[in-house]
Amino acid sequence: MSEQSPRPRKPGKPYRRPQKDPVRFLAFEALRAVDERDAYANLVLPPLLRKARDKGDFDARDAALATELVYGTLRRQGTYDAIIASCVDRPLREVDPPVLDVLSLGVHQLLGTRIPTHAAVSASVELARVVLGDGRAKFVNAVLRKVAQDDFDTWVERVAPPYDDDPEDNLAIVHSHPRWVVSALWDSLGGPRAGIEDLLEADNERPEVTLVARPGRSTTDELLREEAALPGRWSPYAVRLSEGGEPGAVAAVKEGRAGVQDEGSQLVALALANAPLDGPDEKWLDGCAGPGGKAALLAAVAAERGATLLASEKQPHRAGLVAKALAGNPGPYQVIAADGTRPPWRPDSFDRVLMDVPCTGLGALRRRPEARWRRRPEDLDGFAPLQRGLLRTALESVRVGGVVGYATCSPHLAETRAVVDDLLKQFPHTELIDARPLLPGVPALGEGPDVQLWPHLHGTDAMYLALIRRTG
């Protein structure tokens, strides 16, 4: 039954047209785009918010609420699905996806925010009337009233198996990660239950926005003059924006002299730039440069030393993003669109090479929470040949005495140490450099010589870095 064709009402109960709540309607639109088009919320949400602000529908508080509703719902989707499943009389796969999105938004308001219960239920039912029609709005109302009877902790205790019976399944439901991701992260992290719980919970927290002051173009002092700015923790070029800080309003960011870049990403680029090598230090390569954050930082550091950077990216549109990020760099550089596994440059050409390879992205689940639900274990098999091929190119492209940095935004052992170990066997005239001293002041870097960063320990994405020197 649609809102245009309402079911006849009894006398004395005239039909009331549903009222469209701009905030919740926008959140629903964003979730539908994520579900229907495999879009990412961090790409879908900003233009929706700009459009709403331009129309005069939104103020800053509305935008903050819409953002919390979208990201909070996506982060806790696994937990909310388990709760909803216990409140419906059919398998969850038989619930229409738009209905499930409205329900998930409602459950997040009930269990994950301070919105009063009656307001969370009534607003969700009203949204259902607008986007689903009166009939399915009744279903939404019935489910949410069941959910509203208990708080989050009570529901989790009810729907999650006991930890002692099935630790991984318990953690998967409690902390809203697929079981296989919990297992993989635990293998990589090692250690006791407390560590993996801290990591999974950190994945469910909103990450800070971190800026990078590109050397020769901006300074941290300039960025720290912004009202919401705080010093970075580890990178000498990093500045953090406290909650509410808007990077698009920062002049240096608008002008390209600074950028938005996670501090872990900055540390990886700087470690490669500062790694000791033998011989000249004139030609640098970023072999997987898109979208350009590391390349822009490397190019700026290279310019200060009189070196040049070649930034290569296979996808032409991403190469365009790299060119935009490097525009205005104070020293010479070049951006090309090329396949890193079939490089157009000659072997032994570079002094420093960075290969930040495509991966599952399990290290950035704070920023792209929906990725945890899209990735499958079999995706690792798809990335493995590419990762090995790109590292092979890097080792062939660097000269004897030069250094390669192999990086991923995934802590999965199949994408990190397994790849490095395989290629070191194929290239016997190489050696691992201890990367830990090249991240000065950063604690808890493990036994080395490679480095794994963690959201719960370092406040960064879970970036991995291995530094390899070619010796012959």
Image (cartoon, rainbow, N blue to C red):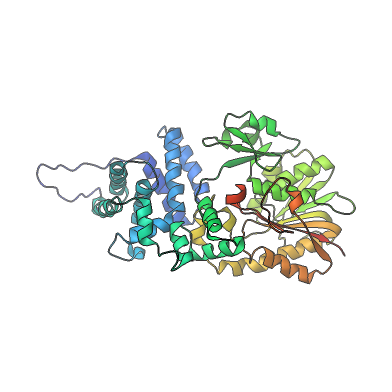
Seen from the viewer's position, the closer of residues 208 and 374 is 208
Name the residue located 42 percent from the left edge and 36 percent from the top edge.
62
Residue 10: % across, % down: 11, 47
Is residue 169 visible to us here? yes
Residue 98, can we see it?
no
Decide: is 2 above or below 416. above
Q: Quadrant of residue 237?
A: top right
> Measured along the vertical axis of the image, is residue 470 above or below residue 295?
below
Q: At 43% from the left edge and 60% from the top edge, which residue is drawn?
A: 173
Residue at left offset 86%, top offset 49%: 281
Q: Residue furthest left?
A: 11
| The quarter of the displayed image where residue 287 is located | bottom right
In which quadrant of the rendered image does the C terminus lie? Answer: bottom right
Percent x, y of residue 229: 60, 33
Q: Residue at x 61, y 29 (%)?
A: 226
Query: Quick check: 52 left or right of 223?
Result: left
Query: Quadrant location of the N terminus?
Result: bottom left
Task: Please say if 193 is above or below 281.
Answer: below
Q: Percent position (x, y) of residue 167?
A: 47, 65
